[in-house]
Image (cartoon, helix red, strand yellow):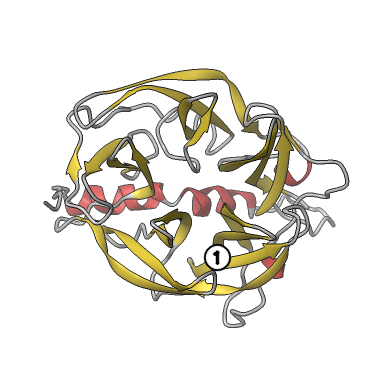
Amino acid sequence: MTWRFAASTASHLFLLVLACGLTVSAQASRQAPAATTDTAKDAWTIGVYTGRSPFQLSPPSGVKNPVLTGAHVTDMPDLNIDTVAHPFLVIAKPRHYMFFTAKDLEANIGGIGLAESANGLDWTFRRTVIREPFVLSDPYVFEWNGEHYMVPESYTQPAVRLYRATAFPDKWEYQQDLLKSDSGEHFISPTVLHHRGTWYLFTSPAGNDTLRLFHAPDLKGPWTEHPSSPIVRNDPDNARPAGRPFMLDGALYRVAQDCAPTYGNQVWAYRITDLSARTYAEVRVETPLVKASSQGWNSKAMHHVDAHQTGKDQWIAAVDALGRH
């Protein structure tokens, strides 16, 4: 079953503008103050944090964040890549791979970038792995049955697209739409999760204040909206997905952007206490995973965390931030 939505043209145009949070935030940051000789400007960049758990993350000693900036993306010479964000890690020892949004903010186009590392701390840009004629971002990468898949955000297209790696990590092919709207509705930050034999998909419509939930017996569908959806209504503090769900001490957590009073100022975790094809419940953990620092590379916002356990009481996370570097 394909879920279908209804939306007026006027509402669609207004909400589409709100959906592109990176564009809105960075456009504001490009408004240079009058009479200054400081040529630096705020930009979205990517950093690495480590800690004993996702709730104890901080910059690791000896690492200077950000580890990736738009200047590192060198294989799209027709664009001015000034924005990198939404990093997702794949730890395939002895290598670490990072997939991320790479975007020319002015043109509002770009692709999905790939960086690699021998230790997870020092990163080198490798290549752009997917480039479409429309905007792709937020490249949620995961492994299933021995293959790697990606579900990126394609907010200008009324669909959730599934890609599969034909030669990991460099080559990817579009497989199918998981969700599609004939009426022009869009799906922001789609995030998939396999839990106890069922697939779940969290996604927000435009506006950053609502979270929908879908479920399916198989990754490729059919997808149906959950009876409890939307699980967040009219709440920009808690709705929009902000990275990969994680397990800690047997508990499952989802992560969400806090978009009030400003877009993406911190990331919250929510312990999922009940999840089935019929029921859903969660409780917020009152300690943000990351938050803006008011200075430097992460002064304005932090809105994404992808945390992975690498050993006992050892975690590494790819994060993004808006600030000056």
In the picture provided, is 202 more to the left or to the right than 297?
left
Where residue 47 sits in the image (x, y, percent)?
A: 70, 49
- SS type, badge 1: strand
What residue is shown at x 74% (from left), y 46% (from top)? Answer: 297
What residue is shown at x 49% (from left), y 43% (from top)? Answer: 244
Number of labels in the image equals 1
As rendered, which of 259 and 251 lies closer to the eye?
251
Relative to residue 134, is residue 306 depicted above or below?
A: above
Dividing the picture into quadrants, the one containing residue 201 is top left
Residue indicated by mark 1: 103
What residue is shown at x 52% (from left), y 19% (from top)? Answer: 285
Relative to residue 109, is residue 303 depicted above or below?
A: above
In the picture provided, is 11 more to the left or to the right than 128?
left
What's under tag 1, amino acid-wise?
A: Lys
Packing grade of label 1 (10 A; few <14, some 14-19, many >=20) is: many
The answer to whether residue 197 is seen in the rendering is yes
Where residue 178 sits in the image (x, y, percent)?
A: 25, 56
Where residue 156 sits in the image (x, y, percent)?
A: 34, 61
In the picture provided, is 12 more to the left or to the right than 67?
left
The answer to whether residue 43 is seen in the rendering is no
Where residue 292 sits in the image (x, y, percent)?
A: 67, 35
Dividing the picture into quadrants, the one containing residue 203 is top left
Q: Residue furthest right?
A: 62
